[in-house]
Image (cartoon, rainbow, N blue to C red):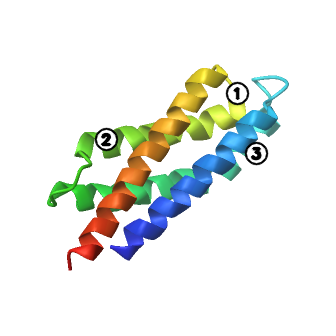
Amino acid sequence: MTDLYAQTMELKRLSDHLAERYAAGEGPVDRKDHDFFQMVKKETMPLFEKNDKWLDTASAFVKDREVKVHPNQVQSTHENIELLILHSFYLDVKKKRYNELHHSVHYVLDMILTSLSEQEGSH
């Protein structure tokens, strides 16, 4: 499951990078700006793909194992990462809500990392 470890660490770094982007406050001047939309689309496509890959790997990990992470938490984290991606570019949520999403994502990612290390230790 080192694949899951690497993917999870990558998502942690990604979510931190997105939080920095959100904090910098570089959103669109005009929400209907086509060039900004195209730039966002180009930059976020690989992020969404990484998130989708992680969902597949993490779902398989929690499905058949006795871990402290529930499949619903994996699904919710996937959705929260999608929200972080979008809100980081469009800045359309309050800081408190953004931080709650960021914290929630890190919490579940850390739980998965802990479960991985516990399983490694039990072998």
Q: Is residue 51 above or below residue 93?
A: below
- At 18% from the left edge and 55% from the top edge, which residue is drawn? 63
Label 2 with label 1: CB-CB less than 8 Å: no
Q: What residue did someone put label 3 on?
A: 39
> Does dot 2 land on a helix, a strand or a loop?
helix
- At 38% from the left edge and 66% from the top edge, which residue is drawn? 4
Q: Which amino acid does label 2 sit on?
A: Gln
Is residue 26 in view from this perspective? Answer: no
Q: In this view, does 11 lie to the left or right of 28?
A: left
Could you tell which of marks 2 and 1 lies nearer the N-terminus? Answer: 2
Could you tell which of marks 3 and 1 lies nearer the N-terminus? Answer: 3
Q: What residue did someone put label 1 on?
A: 91
Of the pair 92 and 10, the residue shown nearer to us: 10
On the image, the x and y values in percent for residue 16 come to 63, 48
On the image, the x and y values in percent for residue 97 come to 56, 23
- At 51% from the left edge and 37% from the top edge, which residue is drawn? 103
Q: Residue furthest bottom?
A: 123
> Does dot 3 land on a helix, a strand or a loop?
helix
Of the pair 33 and 18, the residue shown nearer to us: 18
On the image, the x and y values in percent for residue 120 come to 28, 75
The CA span between labels 3 and 1 is: 15 Å
Question: On the image, which quarter does residue 18 sit in?
Answer: top right
**The disc label shown at residue 73, or none:** 2
Q: In this view, does 74 lie to the left or right of 14?
A: left
Count of marks placed on residues: 3
**Would you call the spot at circle 3 few (<14 residues within 10 Å), some (14-19), or many (20 or more)?**
few
Q: What residue type is labelled 1?
A: Leu
Which numbered disc, 3 or 1, marks the residue closer to the eye?
Answer: 1
Which numbered disc, 2 or 3, marks the residue closer to the eye?
Answer: 2
Which numbered disc, 2 or 1, marks the residue closer to the eye?
Answer: 2
